[in-house]
Amino acid sequence: MNFNSLRKEIISNNASVKELVNDIFAKIEDKDPEINSYICTTRDNAISQAENIDKLIQNKEKLPPLAGMPIAIKDNICTKGVATTCASKMLKSFIAPYESTASRKIWSSGGICLGKTNLDEFAMGSSTETSVFGVTSNPWDINRVPGGSSGGSAASVAAGFCAAAIGSDTGGSIRQPASFCGVVGLKPTYGRVSRWGLVAFASSLDQIGPITNTVSDAAEILYSISGKDPFDSTCLDKPVPNYLTDLNKSIKGLKIGIIKECFEHPGLNPEVKESVLSGVDRFQALGAEITEVECPRFNDGIATYYVIAPSEASANLARYDGVKYGYRSNEGSNLIDMTSKSRAEGFGDEVQRRILIGTYALSAGYSDAYYKKAQKVRTLIRKDFDNAFKKVDVLLTPTCPTTAFLKGDFVNDPLSMYLSDLLTVPANLAGLPAISIPCGFDKKGLPIGMQLIGNVLEEDRILNAANIFEIDAQVIKNRPLF
Ligand code: GLN
Protein backbone atom coordinates (compact mmCIF):
# COMPACT_ATOMS: atom_id res chain seq x y z
CA MET A 1 0.00 0.00 0.00
CA ASN A 2 2.51 2.64 -1.07
CA PHE A 3 1.52 6.18 -2.01
CA ASN A 4 1.80 5.70 -5.77
CA SER A 5 -0.35 2.57 -5.85
CA LEU A 6 -2.98 4.26 -3.68
CA ARG A 7 -2.93 7.32 -5.92
CA LYS A 8 -3.53 5.15 -8.96
CA GLU A 9 -6.60 3.72 -7.29
CA ILE A 10 -7.87 7.14 -6.32
CA ILE A 11 -7.14 8.84 -9.63
CA SER A 12 -8.44 6.01 -11.80
CA ASN A 13 -11.54 6.33 -9.60
CA ASN A 14 -11.76 2.69 -8.66
CA ALA A 15 -12.42 3.83 -5.13
CA SER A 16 -13.24 7.00 -3.27
CA VAL A 17 -10.86 8.00 -0.50
CA LYS A 18 -13.69 7.36 1.94
CA GLU A 19 -14.08 3.78 0.68
CA LEU A 20 -10.35 3.21 0.93
CA VAL A 21 -10.28 4.52 4.46
CA ASN A 22 -13.27 2.38 5.44
CA ASP A 23 -11.54 -0.70 4.01
CA ILE A 24 -8.45 0.01 6.11
CA PHE A 25 -10.52 0.43 9.27
CA ALA A 26 -12.25 -2.89 8.53
CA LYS A 27 -8.82 -4.53 8.22
CA ILE A 28 -7.64 -2.91 11.46
CA GLU A 29 -10.75 -4.10 13.29
CA ASP A 30 -10.35 -7.61 11.97
CA LYS A 31 -6.60 -8.10 12.29
CA ASP A 32 -5.07 -5.54 14.62
CA PRO A 33 -6.15 -7.40 17.77
CA GLU A 34 -3.39 -9.90 16.80
CA ILE A 35 -0.78 -7.17 16.31
CA ASN A 36 -1.89 -4.40 18.71
CA SER A 37 -0.28 -1.67 16.62
CA TYR A 38 -2.91 1.00 17.41
CA ILE A 39 -3.69 2.48 20.80
CA CYS A 40 -6.70 4.25 19.34
CA THR A 41 -8.21 4.91 15.95
CA THR A 42 -9.76 8.21 14.89
CA ARG A 43 -12.45 7.09 12.44
CA ASP A 44 -14.63 10.22 12.59
CA ASN A 45 -11.70 12.53 11.85
CA ALA A 46 -10.51 10.23 9.09
CA ILE A 47 -13.91 10.06 7.39
CA SER A 48 -14.37 13.83 7.41
CA GLN A 49 -10.83 14.37 6.06
CA ALA A 50 -11.52 11.71 3.37
CA GLU A 51 -14.80 13.38 2.38
CA ASN A 52 -12.96 16.68 1.93
CA ILE A 53 -10.46 15.07 -0.44
CA ASP A 54 -13.25 13.30 -2.32
CA LYS A 55 -14.93 16.66 -2.83
CA LEU A 56 -11.73 18.13 -4.26
CA ILE A 57 -11.47 15.16 -6.63
CA GLN A 58 -15.10 15.47 -7.73
CA ASN A 59 -14.67 19.18 -8.38
CA LYS A 60 -11.42 18.49 -10.24
CA GLU A 61 -9.56 20.91 -7.97
CA LYS A 62 -5.82 20.81 -7.40
CA LEU A 63 -4.97 18.14 -4.86
CA PRO A 64 -2.49 18.75 -2.03
CA PRO A 65 0.61 16.51 -2.18
CA LEU A 66 -0.46 13.84 0.33
CA ALA A 67 -4.14 13.90 -0.67
CA GLY A 68 -5.92 10.79 0.59
CA MET A 69 -2.84 9.07 2.04
CA PRO A 70 -3.88 7.24 5.26
CA ILE A 71 -1.30 7.90 7.96
CA ALA A 72 -0.90 6.81 11.59
CA ILE A 73 0.83 8.85 14.31
CA LYS A 74 2.96 7.56 17.18
CA ASP A 75 1.17 8.21 20.43
CA ASN A 76 3.82 10.52 21.86
CA ILE A 77 2.94 13.16 19.28
CA CYS A 78 0.13 15.54 20.19
CA THR A 79 -3.03 15.41 18.09
CA LYS A 80 -5.61 17.99 19.09
CA GLY A 81 -8.68 16.62 20.85
CA VAL A 82 -7.32 13.08 20.73
CA ALA A 83 -5.73 11.11 23.58
CA THR A 84 -1.93 11.34 23.54
CA THR A 85 -0.84 8.78 26.09
CA CYS A 86 2.86 7.98 25.53
CA ALA A 87 1.64 4.45 26.33
CA SER A 88 1.87 5.39 30.00
CA LYS A 89 -0.53 5.24 32.91
CA MET A 90 0.78 8.74 33.63
CA LEU A 91 -0.89 10.21 30.50
CA LYS A 92 -3.64 7.65 29.95
CA SER A 93 -6.37 10.29 30.16
CA PHE A 94 -4.46 13.19 28.59
CA ILE A 95 -6.29 14.77 25.64
CA ALA A 96 -3.86 16.96 23.70
CA PRO A 97 -5.11 20.56 23.57
CA TYR A 98 -3.04 21.37 20.48
CA GLU A 99 -1.68 19.74 17.33
CA SER A 100 2.02 18.99 16.78
CA THR A 101 3.58 20.90 13.91
CA ALA A 102 4.57 17.72 12.06
CA SER A 103 1.07 16.20 12.16
CA ARG A 104 -0.57 19.56 11.38
CA LYS A 105 1.57 19.79 8.24
CA ILE A 106 0.56 16.29 7.19
CA TRP A 107 -3.14 17.05 7.54
CA SER A 108 -2.78 20.32 5.66
CA SER A 109 -0.99 18.37 2.89
CA GLY A 110 -4.10 16.17 2.57
CA GLY A 111 -3.04 13.18 4.71
CA ILE A 112 -5.75 11.22 6.53
CA CYS A 113 -5.31 10.59 10.27
CA LEU A 114 -6.10 6.95 11.05
CA GLY A 115 -5.12 6.96 14.72
CA LYS A 116 -2.36 6.72 17.29
CA THR A 117 0.16 3.90 17.41
CA ASN A 118 1.67 1.93 20.26
CA LEU A 119 5.16 2.53 21.64
CA ASP A 120 7.42 1.79 24.57
CA GLU A 121 6.35 3.94 27.49
CA PHE A 122 7.56 7.50 26.84
CA ALA A 123 9.54 6.14 23.84
CA MET A 124 12.06 4.47 26.15
CA GLY A 125 12.85 1.03 24.82
CA SER A 126 13.61 -1.11 21.80
CA SER A 127 10.77 -3.62 21.78
CA THR A 128 7.36 -1.97 22.40
CA GLU A 129 6.95 -4.27 25.39
CA THR A 130 6.66 -1.59 28.08
CA SER A 131 3.40 -0.04 26.84
CA VAL A 132 0.59 0.13 29.38
CA PHE A 133 -1.64 -0.92 26.45
CA GLY A 134 0.20 -4.23 25.99
CA VAL A 135 2.90 -5.55 23.69
CA THR A 136 2.84 -5.03 19.91
CA SER A 137 3.61 -8.08 17.75
CA ASN A 138 5.85 -8.22 14.71
CA PRO A 139 3.67 -8.97 11.65
CA TRP A 140 6.42 -11.23 10.22
CA ASP A 141 6.26 -13.46 13.32
CA ILE A 142 3.80 -12.61 16.05
CA ASN A 143 5.96 -14.28 18.71
CA ARG A 144 8.56 -11.61 18.10
CA VAL A 145 8.81 -7.93 18.95
CA PRO A 146 8.40 -5.27 16.26
CA GLY A 147 11.32 -3.29 17.71
CA GLY A 148 10.85 0.00 19.46
CA SER A 149 10.07 2.42 20.54
CA SER A 150 8.00 3.23 17.39
CA GLY A 151 7.00 -0.45 17.16
CA GLY A 152 3.29 0.26 16.64
CA SER A 153 4.09 2.61 13.74
CA ALA A 154 6.43 0.13 12.01
CA ALA A 155 4.12 -2.86 12.58
CA SER A 156 1.09 -0.99 11.24
CA VAL A 157 2.96 -0.08 8.03
CA ALA A 158 4.25 -3.65 7.59
CA ALA A 159 0.78 -5.12 8.20
CA GLY A 160 -0.97 -2.71 5.82
CA PHE A 161 -2.97 -0.99 8.58
CA CYS A 162 -1.88 2.40 7.18
CA ALA A 163 0.06 3.63 4.15
CA ALA A 164 2.70 5.31 6.31
CA ALA A 165 3.29 6.27 9.91
CA ILE A 166 5.10 8.93 11.88
CA GLY A 167 7.57 7.97 14.58
CA SER A 168 10.12 9.63 16.80
CA ASP A 169 13.79 8.72 17.04
CA THR A 170 15.94 9.59 20.04
CA GLY A 171 18.41 6.74 19.72
CA GLY A 172 17.03 4.62 16.91
CA SER A 173 13.30 4.37 17.54
CA ILE A 174 12.36 4.93 13.90
CA ARG A 175 15.15 2.96 12.24
CA GLN A 176 15.33 -0.09 14.53
CA PRO A 177 11.61 -1.01 14.31
CA ALA A 178 11.69 -0.26 10.56
CA SER A 179 14.54 -2.77 10.30
CA PHE A 180 12.69 -5.41 12.38
CA CYS A 181 9.48 -4.99 10.37
CA GLY A 182 10.95 -4.81 6.85
CA VAL A 183 9.95 -1.21 6.14
CA VAL A 184 11.72 2.12 5.55
CA GLY A 185 12.48 4.45 8.48
CA LEU A 186 14.11 7.89 8.29
CA LYS A 187 15.51 9.98 11.12
CA PRO A 188 16.09 13.49 9.80
CA THR A 189 18.94 15.86 10.72
CA TYR A 190 18.41 17.31 14.21
CA GLY A 191 16.35 20.46 13.66
CA ARG A 192 15.08 19.55 10.18
CA VAL A 193 11.61 18.76 11.56
CA SER A 194 9.93 20.71 14.34
CA ARG A 195 9.62 18.92 17.69
CA TRP A 196 6.67 21.09 18.70
CA GLY A 197 4.03 18.75 20.07
CA LEU A 198 6.39 15.78 20.47
CA VAL A 199 6.37 14.77 24.12
CA ALA A 200 9.99 15.38 25.10
CA PHE A 201 12.21 12.43 26.00
CA ALA A 202 15.78 13.71 25.43
CA SER A 203 15.47 17.09 23.77
CA SER A 204 18.95 17.29 22.21
CA LEU A 205 18.41 13.93 20.48
CA ASP A 206 14.67 13.68 19.65
CA GLN A 207 13.53 13.96 16.03
CA ILE A 208 10.25 13.14 14.30
CA GLY A 209 10.36 11.21 11.02
CA PRO A 210 8.51 8.89 8.63
CA ILE A 211 8.11 5.10 8.56
CA THR A 212 6.97 4.00 5.11
CA ASN A 213 6.70 1.22 2.55
CA THR A 214 9.06 2.87 0.10
CA VAL A 215 11.93 5.35 0.09
CA SER A 216 10.00 7.71 -2.15
CA ASP A 217 7.10 7.79 0.36
CA ALA A 218 9.62 8.73 3.06
CA ALA A 219 10.90 11.53 0.80
CA GLU A 220 7.36 12.84 0.32
CA ILE A 221 6.57 12.88 4.01
CA LEU A 222 9.90 14.47 4.90
CA TYR A 223 9.20 17.24 2.42
CA SER A 224 5.80 17.92 3.93
CA ILE A 225 6.92 17.98 7.60
CA SER A 226 10.29 19.79 7.35
CA GLY A 227 11.05 23.46 7.80
CA LYS A 228 11.36 26.30 10.25
CA ASP A 229 8.84 26.56 13.06
CA PRO A 230 8.56 29.54 15.39
CA PHE A 231 7.34 27.14 18.12
CA ASP A 232 10.63 25.19 18.19
CA SER A 233 13.78 27.29 18.59
CA THR A 234 16.01 24.32 17.68
CA CYS A 235 14.26 23.93 14.34
CA LEU A 236 16.54 24.98 11.48
CA ASP A 237 15.78 27.96 9.28
CA LYS A 238 17.04 26.29 6.12
CA PRO A 239 15.28 25.86 2.78
CA VAL A 240 13.49 22.55 2.31
CA PRO A 241 14.43 20.94 -1.00
CA ASN A 242 11.93 18.81 -2.87
CA TYR A 243 13.31 15.44 -1.83
CA LEU A 244 11.72 13.73 -4.84
CA THR A 245 13.78 15.68 -7.37
CA ASP A 246 17.07 13.75 -7.09
CA LEU A 247 15.62 10.45 -5.96
CA ASN A 248 16.33 8.61 -9.22
CA LYS A 249 19.69 10.22 -10.00
CA SER A 250 22.46 7.76 -10.87
CA ILE A 251 24.72 6.92 -7.95
CA LYS A 252 27.75 6.39 -10.18
CA GLY A 253 30.75 7.75 -8.31
CA LEU A 254 28.89 8.18 -5.02
CA LYS A 255 31.43 7.57 -2.28
CA ILE A 256 30.07 5.17 0.34
CA GLY A 257 32.10 4.60 3.50
CA ILE A 258 31.79 1.31 5.36
CA ILE A 259 32.30 1.97 9.06
CA LYS A 260 34.97 -0.55 10.04
CA GLU A 261 34.18 -0.63 13.76
CA CYS A 262 30.57 -1.75 13.17
CA PHE A 263 31.43 -4.72 11.04
CA GLU A 264 34.11 -5.87 13.48
CA HIS A 265 31.82 -5.73 16.52
CA PRO A 266 31.50 -9.15 18.21
CA GLY A 267 27.77 -8.61 18.87
CA LEU A 268 26.96 -8.43 15.16
CA ASN A 269 24.95 -11.45 14.02
CA PRO A 270 26.79 -13.18 11.11
CA GLU A 271 23.64 -13.44 8.99
CA VAL A 272 23.03 -9.70 9.37
CA LYS A 273 26.65 -8.97 8.50
CA GLU A 274 26.54 -11.16 5.40
CA SER A 275 23.30 -9.63 4.16
CA VAL A 276 24.49 -6.04 4.65
CA LEU A 277 27.82 -6.82 2.96
CA SER A 278 25.98 -8.25 -0.03
CA GLY A 279 24.07 -4.95 -0.07
CA VAL A 280 27.47 -3.23 -0.24
CA ASP A 281 28.36 -5.38 -3.29
CA ARG A 282 25.11 -4.31 -4.91
CA PHE A 283 25.97 -0.65 -4.34
CA GLN A 284 29.34 -1.28 -5.98
CA ALA A 285 27.66 -2.90 -8.96
CA LEU A 286 25.41 0.16 -9.19
CA GLY A 287 28.49 2.34 -9.61
CA ALA A 288 29.18 3.54 -6.06
CA GLU A 289 32.77 3.71 -4.85
CA ILE A 290 33.16 1.76 -1.64
CA THR A 291 35.85 2.58 0.93
CA GLU A 292 36.40 1.52 4.50
CA VAL A 293 36.44 4.36 7.01
CA GLU A 294 37.32 4.47 10.67
CA CYS A 295 35.14 6.00 13.35
CA PRO A 296 37.15 5.03 16.44
CA ARG A 297 34.55 6.34 18.90
CA PHE A 298 31.50 4.87 17.15
CA ASN A 299 31.13 1.98 19.60
CA ASP A 300 31.31 4.39 22.56
CA GLY A 301 27.96 5.74 21.42
CA ILE A 302 25.97 3.40 23.67
CA ALA A 303 27.71 4.39 26.91
CA THR A 304 27.47 8.06 25.95
CA TYR A 305 23.81 7.87 24.96
CA TYR A 306 22.79 6.03 28.11
CA VAL A 307 24.15 8.89 30.21
CA ILE A 308 22.90 11.81 28.12
CA ALA A 309 19.42 10.47 27.23
CA PRO A 310 18.42 9.54 30.82
CA SER A 311 19.85 12.86 32.10
CA GLU A 312 17.67 14.86 29.73
CA ALA A 313 14.75 12.53 30.39
CA SER A 314 15.00 13.06 34.15
CA ALA A 315 14.67 16.81 33.59
CA ASN A 316 11.88 16.52 31.00
CA LEU A 317 9.82 14.09 33.07
CA ALA A 318 9.97 16.23 36.21
CA ARG A 319 6.79 17.96 35.02
CA TYR A 320 4.65 14.87 35.69
CA ASP A 321 3.97 15.56 39.33
CA GLY A 322 0.28 14.79 39.67
CA VAL A 323 -0.48 18.53 39.66
CA LYS A 324 0.47 20.11 36.36
CA TYR A 325 0.02 17.03 34.21
CA GLY A 326 -0.92 13.45 34.42
CA TYR A 327 -1.99 10.77 36.82
CA ARG A 328 -2.51 11.71 40.47
CA SER A 329 -2.37 9.16 43.28
CA ASN A 330 -5.21 9.26 45.81
CA GLU A 331 -2.90 8.05 48.55
CA GLY A 332 -0.67 11.01 49.32
CA SER A 333 -1.11 12.74 52.68
CA ASN A 334 0.84 15.87 51.74
CA LEU A 335 2.28 17.46 48.59
CA ILE A 336 5.59 15.59 48.58
CA ASP A 337 3.95 12.30 49.44
CA MET A 338 1.28 12.77 46.76
CA THR A 339 3.91 13.68 44.13
CA SER A 340 6.17 10.76 44.84
CA LYS A 341 3.25 8.30 44.96
CA SER A 342 1.86 9.69 41.70
CA ARG A 343 5.23 9.19 40.01
CA ALA A 344 5.77 5.74 41.50
CA GLU A 345 2.31 4.56 40.41
CA GLY A 346 2.11 6.48 37.13
CA PHE A 347 5.49 5.54 35.59
CA GLY A 348 6.52 2.00 34.69
CA ASP A 349 9.81 0.37 35.72
CA GLU A 350 11.88 1.37 32.69
CA VAL A 351 10.87 5.02 32.91
CA GLN A 352 11.67 5.08 36.63
CA ARG A 353 15.02 3.42 35.94
CA ARG A 354 15.90 6.16 33.41
CA ILE A 355 14.84 8.93 35.78
CA LEU A 356 17.02 7.44 38.52
CA ILE A 357 20.04 7.05 36.24
CA GLY A 358 19.58 10.60 34.92
CA THR A 359 19.13 12.17 38.33
CA TYR A 360 22.25 10.38 39.55
CA ALA A 361 24.33 11.42 36.51
CA LEU A 362 23.31 15.06 36.94
CA SER A 363 23.66 15.28 40.71
CA ALA A 364 26.25 17.49 42.39
CA GLY A 365 29.60 15.77 42.59
CA TYR A 366 28.78 13.31 39.79
CA SER A 367 27.87 15.49 36.84
CA ASP A 368 31.53 16.17 35.90
CA ALA A 369 32.33 12.48 36.00
CA TYR A 370 29.29 11.33 34.04
CA TYR A 371 27.24 13.97 32.25
CA LYS A 372 30.07 16.31 31.24
CA LYS A 373 32.31 13.41 30.31
CA ALA A 374 29.54 12.00 28.11
CA GLN A 375 29.16 15.38 26.40
CA LYS A 376 32.90 15.35 25.64
CA VAL A 377 32.70 11.89 24.11
CA ARG A 378 29.68 13.09 22.14
CA THR A 379 31.90 15.78 20.60
CA LEU A 380 34.53 13.18 19.73
CA ILE A 381 31.90 11.03 18.01
CA ARG A 382 30.77 14.04 16.01
CA LYS A 383 34.41 14.74 15.02
CA ASP A 384 34.83 11.15 13.82
CA PHE A 385 31.86 11.70 11.53
CA ASP A 386 33.23 15.07 10.35
CA ASN A 387 36.50 13.36 9.39
CA ALA A 388 34.69 10.50 7.67
CA PHE A 389 32.60 12.93 5.60
CA LYS A 390 35.81 14.55 4.33
CA LYS A 391 36.46 11.26 2.51
CA VAL A 392 33.01 9.93 1.63
CA ASP A 393 29.47 11.14 0.85
CA VAL A 394 27.45 8.57 2.78
CA LEU A 395 28.22 6.07 5.55
CA LEU A 396 26.85 2.54 5.67
CA THR A 397 26.24 0.15 8.59
CA PRO A 398 23.72 -2.51 9.53
CA THR A 399 20.76 -0.88 11.31
CA CYS A 400 20.75 -3.39 14.18
CA PRO A 401 23.11 -6.13 15.31
CA THR A 402 20.29 -8.72 15.06
CA THR A 403 16.89 -9.35 13.53
CA ALA A 404 13.68 -9.18 15.60
CA PHE A 405 14.07 -11.02 18.90
CA LEU A 406 11.45 -13.04 20.77
CA LYS A 407 9.02 -11.30 23.12
CA GLY A 408 10.32 -11.53 26.66
CA ASP A 409 13.95 -12.13 25.64
CA PHE A 410 15.26 -8.92 27.22
CA VAL A 411 12.48 -7.58 29.44
CA ASN A 412 14.39 -8.52 32.57
CA ASP A 413 17.78 -7.66 31.12
CA PRO A 414 17.73 -3.93 30.33
CA LEU A 415 21.48 -3.78 29.73
CA SER A 416 21.31 -6.28 26.86
CA MET A 417 18.34 -4.36 25.45
CA TYR A 418 20.43 -1.14 25.57
CA LEU A 419 23.29 -2.85 23.71
CA SER A 420 20.99 -3.52 20.77
CA ASP A 421 20.98 0.25 20.07
CA LEU A 422 24.69 0.14 19.26
CA LEU A 423 24.43 1.10 15.60
CA THR A 424 21.68 3.70 15.72
CA VAL A 425 22.58 6.02 18.62
CA PRO A 426 25.72 7.61 17.06
CA ALA A 427 23.63 9.40 14.38
CA ASN A 428 21.46 10.96 17.11
CA LEU A 429 24.47 12.01 19.18
CA ALA A 430 25.93 13.74 16.11
CA GLY A 431 22.55 15.10 14.90
CA LEU A 432 22.93 13.40 11.50
CA PRO A 433 20.22 12.11 9.16
CA ALA A 434 20.02 8.32 8.80
CA ILE A 435 17.72 5.90 7.02
CA SER A 436 17.05 2.18 7.43
CA ILE A 437 15.99 0.16 4.39
CA PRO A 438 15.36 -3.57 4.04
CA CYS A 439 18.36 -5.38 2.50
CA GLY A 440 17.53 -9.07 2.97
CA PHE A 441 16.20 -11.79 5.27
CA ASP A 442 17.75 -14.16 7.77
CA LYS A 443 17.22 -17.93 7.65
CA LYS A 444 14.08 -17.60 9.76
CA GLY A 445 12.57 -15.29 7.16
CA LEU A 446 12.93 -12.16 9.28
CA PRO A 447 13.82 -8.87 7.59
CA ILE A 448 17.30 -7.33 7.90
CA GLY A 449 17.88 -3.57 7.72
CA MET A 450 20.78 -1.57 6.31
CA GLN A 451 21.51 1.95 7.57
CA LEU A 452 22.78 4.87 5.49
CA ILE A 453 23.99 7.91 7.45
CA GLY A 454 24.36 11.30 5.75
CA ASN A 455 26.09 14.53 6.60
CA VAL A 456 24.07 17.37 8.17
CA LEU A 457 21.03 18.25 6.01
CA GLU A 458 22.05 15.78 3.31
CA GLU A 459 18.84 13.78 3.48
CA ASP A 460 18.64 14.05 -0.32
CA ARG A 461 21.83 12.00 -0.70
CA ILE A 462 20.82 9.11 1.56
CA LEU A 463 17.32 9.07 0.06
CA ASN A 464 18.80 8.92 -3.45
CA ALA A 465 21.15 6.04 -2.59
CA ALA A 466 18.41 4.20 -0.67
CA ASN A 467 15.92 4.61 -3.52
CA ILE A 468 18.33 3.30 -6.18
CA PHE A 469 19.11 0.33 -3.94
CA GLU A 470 15.43 -0.37 -3.24
CA ILE A 471 14.48 -0.35 -6.92
CA ASP A 472 17.39 -2.57 -7.90
CA ALA A 473 17.20 -5.05 -5.02
CA GLN A 474 13.39 -5.46 -4.75
CA VAL A 475 13.90 -7.00 -1.29
CA ILE A 476 10.30 -6.95 -0.10
CA LYS A 477 8.28 -8.92 -2.61
CA ASN A 478 5.49 -9.98 -0.32
CA ARG A 479 4.23 -8.37 2.85
CA PRO A 480 3.53 -10.52 5.89
CA LEU A 481 0.04 -12.00 5.89
CA PHE A 482 -2.04 -9.31 7.53
N1 GLN B 1 16.02 2.27 22.26
C1 GLN B 1 16.52 3.56 22.64
C2 GLN B 1 16.14 3.85 24.07
O1 GLN B 1 15.61 3.01 24.68
C3 GLN B 1 16.01 4.61 21.71
C4 GLN B 1 14.66 5.11 22.02
C5 GLN B 1 14.18 6.16 21.06
O2 GLN B 1 14.80 6.41 20.03
N2 GLN B 1 13.09 6.81 21.44
O3 GLN B 1 16.39 4.88 24.59
Image (cartoon, rainbow, N blue to C red):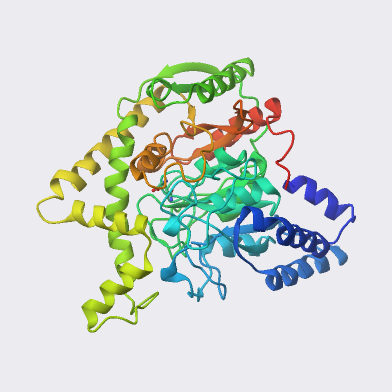
> What residue appears at the point 23 percent right and 81 percent down from the top-left corner?
335
> What residue appears at the point 54 percent right and 59 percent down from the top-left corner?
102
Q: Is 200 placed left or right of 155 in the picture?
A: left
What x and y, as percent, mark residue 369? Answer: 14, 44
Which of 481/421 is in front? 481
Q: Is 213 placed left or right of 331 in the picture?
A: right
Can you say whether 77 is above or below 468 in the image? Answer: below
Which of 214/356 is in front? 356
> What residue appears at the point 22 percent right and 57 percent down from the top-left corner?
359
What x and y, as percent, mark residue 139? Answer: 64, 45
Q: Is 2 placed left or right of 198 in the picture?
A: right
Inspect this view and state whether residue 242 appears.
Answer: no
What x and y, as percent, mark residue 50? Answer: 76, 66
Inspect this view and state whether residue 408 appears.
Answer: yes
> What residue appears at the point 20 percent right and 51 percent down from the top-left corner?
361
What x and y, as percent, mark residue 423? Answer: 42, 34
Can you say whether 243 is above or below 449 in the image? Answer: below
Can you say whether 184 is above or below 223 in the image? Answer: above
